[in-house]
Image (cartoon, grey):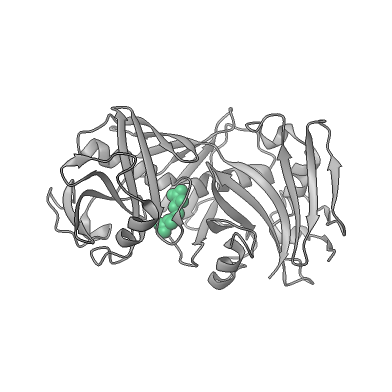
Amino acid sequence: MSISTIVSSSLTSSKFRSLPVTSPSSSHLTYLSKPSSFTLHFNTPKFTITSLLRNSNPQSPLSAISTTAQQNLAHTSSLHPTETKTLHFVKYQGLGNDFIMVNNLDSMEPKVSPEQAVKLCDRNFGIGGDGVIFAMPGRNGTDYTMRIFNSDGSEPEMCGNGVRCFAKFIADLNSLNGGQSFTVHTGAGLIIPEIQPDGKVKVDMGEPVLKASEIPTKIPPNKDQSVVNAKLDVDGVDWYVTCVSMGNPHCVTFSLGDRNLGPDDFNVADIGPKFEHHSLFPARTNTEFVQVLSRTHLKMLVWERGAGATLACGTGACAVVVAAVLEGRSERNCTVDLPGGPLEIEWRKEDNHVYMTGPAEVVFYGSVQL
Ligand SMILES: N[C@@H](CCC[C@H](N)C(=O)O)C(=O)O
């Protein structure tokens, strides 16, 4: 299958360039300007995918690879008017939490249905991803709107790693090099990501919500209206949990029975679904299992609502620091280690906002028949 298309500039704002997209008809490698960087094109009967592989320095920003590659990003993730079943996308990852990014800037209607998102996220029969993210026009005076479908097709309010990837996508579309911030409307309200000069993205994630009924959880509040270090019976075992919403619900646990969690105390894939579908979480929940390494260094595993065990969860890391502070286990500035790498989290006393800093990278871009 071969696809060749020219994307109309009317699909995006006038800031975006209109360039031809040519997909290869057979497998081949094309070397870019740097000898150690190359573009890998390959076809399957269903997909035409262009991958950006960076051998020399996995941390290097996209701009270090190829201007052509950047230009190609400017017209991916949109449907050509005459090829209504071809979706162009860019795959991003933030600490291994990976997303299929769709340029939806011409419409408030997602170009992919929840059912299609499930198929696209499938790691064997699809592109593979923890979710599909839509970059949409701004609402309520914001620059952009971000919506996301989990890999099970459900729609969460917010995604921390996703919003960093979203910010990188917007920066790549507009050839921004760093130092810029923009406002993003999400289901969790206003979120403000800022691309830092080092390429990492710092995000003002707003204020955590602690009121039990707003998280939501039916666990009886034990501190003001919040659930802090409260006993929760999961499948006959007593866990102690603190509940936090970062726009989406999180249940954070540091202890099983009367002892702190150790690395071998539980199997996330076994216990995670039992938290997620617990009757005391009416909107289901994300769950973080945390070890305190020091007062500024935490280590977590996550079971995500609608996505299962992922390599990282940005909102989860924010909820973990809030919970650790509420339980008196940590300072407000922490490094949180996740399977995919570390995030820097600050719960700032002055404004009660949580700030998250971490990486976001392009993996590949391509097109798929819906
Ligand atoms: N991985 C995300 C969270 C994505 C949404 C979550 N699965 C939910 O349903 O709330 C993150 O980085 O925050």
Picture residue at 34% right of the left edge, 40% below the top: 263
Q: In this image, 38 relative to 200: left or right?
A: right
Q: In this image, 261 relative to 119: left or right?
A: left
Query: Toward the viewer: 316 or 139?
Result: 316
Which of the 4 image quarters holds residue 265?
Answer: top left
Q: Is residue 120 above or below residue 174?
A: below
Query: Toward the viewer: 134 or 11?
Result: 134
Q: Give the percent coordinates (x, y) of residue 155.
A: 46, 64
Q: Give the percent coordinates (x, y) of residue 365.
A: 71, 51
Quadrant of the frame with the C terminus: bottom right
Picture residue at 84% right of the left edge, 45% below the top: 29
Q: Give the percent coordinates (x, y) of residue 249.
A: 33, 55
Count of marks placed on residues: 0
Query: Toward the viewer: 39 or 64?
Result: 39
Q: In this image, 302 relative to 131: left or right?
A: left
Picture residue at 29% right of the left edge, 40% below the top: 322
Q: Is residue 220 visible?
A: yes
Q: Give the percent coordinates (x, y) of residue 363.
A: 66, 46
Query: Toward the viewer: 342 or 180?
Result: 342
Picture residue at 55% right of the left edge, 31% below the top: 196
Q: Is residue 68 above or below residue 278?
A: above
Quadrant of the frame with the N terminus: bottom right
Q: Is residue 351 visible?
A: no
